[in-house]
Image (tube, rainbow, N blue to C red):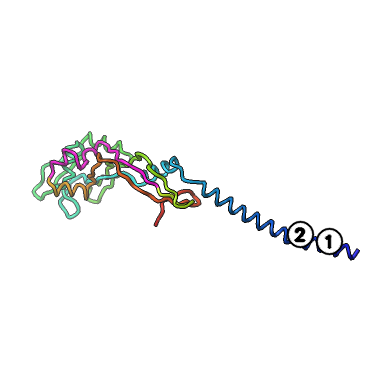
Amino acid sequence: MFEEELELEKKESSLIPMILIFALVAAIVGTAVYFINQARQKLTPEEATTLVQKILVARGPATTQFDAGLIKPSVDVSPQDPHYRILEKAGIVELAKPAKDGSVKISLTKDGEQQLAAFPELKKRELKDGTIVYTVPLAERTLVKVDNVEMRSPTVAVVTYEWAWKTNKVGDAFDADSDLIKTFKVWDRQKLIDKFGADFYHGPNQKTTVTLVKQDNGWQISNQ
């Protein structure tokens, strides 16, 4: 009986290292399979297209801002600013004759009210003096195509894509290459671009590169 117990203990002791070896091999194989599967899970052009479209929407539209009401010249705003002339020619606002102190009453036209009401992105803010500040969308970024998806690692992808502006009627008037803006003086044209949202909206497609990082909640723009 004693000899049988010794023999059983020898068998059990010899099995333990084997079990540990098998467990170690299984862990190594499982880890290798996991990383192989991760490497195969590339960001596809279709997935990149969806992600880039979300990025462009998140950036929001290009906008211009103007005040309506009795506008008095100040450091921040002047009824003589060039964007008011564009808005007037586009039929959005009416400018009354300047008063002796240089103030001008600026009002929305009926057509202007209808146009602005159709923009879900329109923002209105009434000031203490009764004037209303309008922030008007001009154009939104639209994806033309994804040119390339380069996997730098299983969790890092560099996406190159082309996008273009899609303007609304007001945005067409703020195209920096339009016949209307070409009638402005050079410094007024530059002011329209720098301060009032004018841009070359009907220009060629623009190419952009973005780095995406795969996280637990999906692919995100890299902060680095």
Residue positioned most to the right: 1
Residue at image coords 14%, 45%? 104
Residue 180 painted magenta = yes
Depth check: give the residue in front, 127 or 33.
33
Cα separation between marks 2 and 1: 11 Å
**Which of disc 1 and disc 2 is earlier in sequence?**
1
Three-letter amino acid code at the position of disc 1: Leu
Residue 12 image point, x, y percent: 79, 61
> Which residue, given by chain and number where applicable, does mark 1 sit on?
8
- Magenta highlight range: 159-184
Instruction: Determine whether label 2 and label 1 are within 8 Å by CB.
Output: no
Residue 13 image point, x, y percent: 77, 63
Three-letter amino acid code at the position of disc 2: Leu
Residue at image coords 39%, 57%? 224
Give the SS element for disc 2: helix
Depth check: give the residue in front, 198 or 20.
20
> Which residue, given by chain and number where applicable, does mark 2 sit on?
15
In this rendering, position of residue 72 left or right of residue 37: left
Query: On residue 20, which mark appears?
Result: none
